[in-house]
Image (cartoon, grey):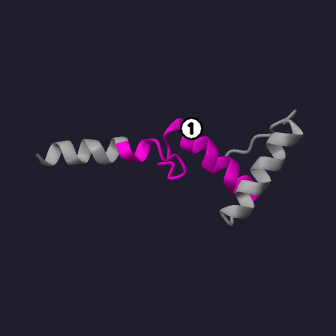
Amino acid sequence: MISITIKGIPEETHRELKKRAAAHRRSLNSEVIFALESILGGVPDTAVPAQRPQKQAKKFARRK
C-alpha cells in the first residue's frame, strides 16, 4: 500500500471528515480513502441520492 500525507486541511473539512467517519463507523483514514474512491469512481457512492434515480430510470428503460 502507498501512503500519502495531506497538509493544510482546513479545520472545518477535518471536522466534517471526522463526523462522517464516526457516522459510517470507519476510521478517519478509511473515510478519506472511501471519499477519494467515490470521487474517482473506485466505488459506488451510496450517499449521493441524485445518482440512484438516474440508474434506476436507466434500468427501467432497458426493461421495456
- Per the rendered image, the range of residues in magenta is 27-53
- Quarter of the rendering containing residue 27: bottom right
- Residue 8 image position (x, y, % from top left): 87, 33
For image coordinates 79% across by 54% down, the residue present is 18
- Quarter of the rendering containing residue 28: bottom right
Q: Which residue is mark 1?
A: 39
On screen, residue 44 versus residue 9, left or right, reads: left
Magenta run includes residue 47: yes
On screen, residue 54 versus residue 34, left or right, reads: left
- Residue 3 image position (x, y, % from top left): 73, 45
Residue type, mark 1 in image: Ile
- Residue lying furthest left: 64
Badge 1 element? helix
On screen, residue 30 versus residue 62, left or right, reads: right
On screen, residue 26 versus residue 5, left or right, reads: left
For image coordinates 24% across by 47% down, the residue present is 59
Which sits in the foreground, 10 or 8?
A: 10
- Residue 52 image position (x, y, % from top left): 40, 47
- Residue 29 image position (x, y, % from top left): 73, 53
Q: Is residue 12 visible?
A: yes
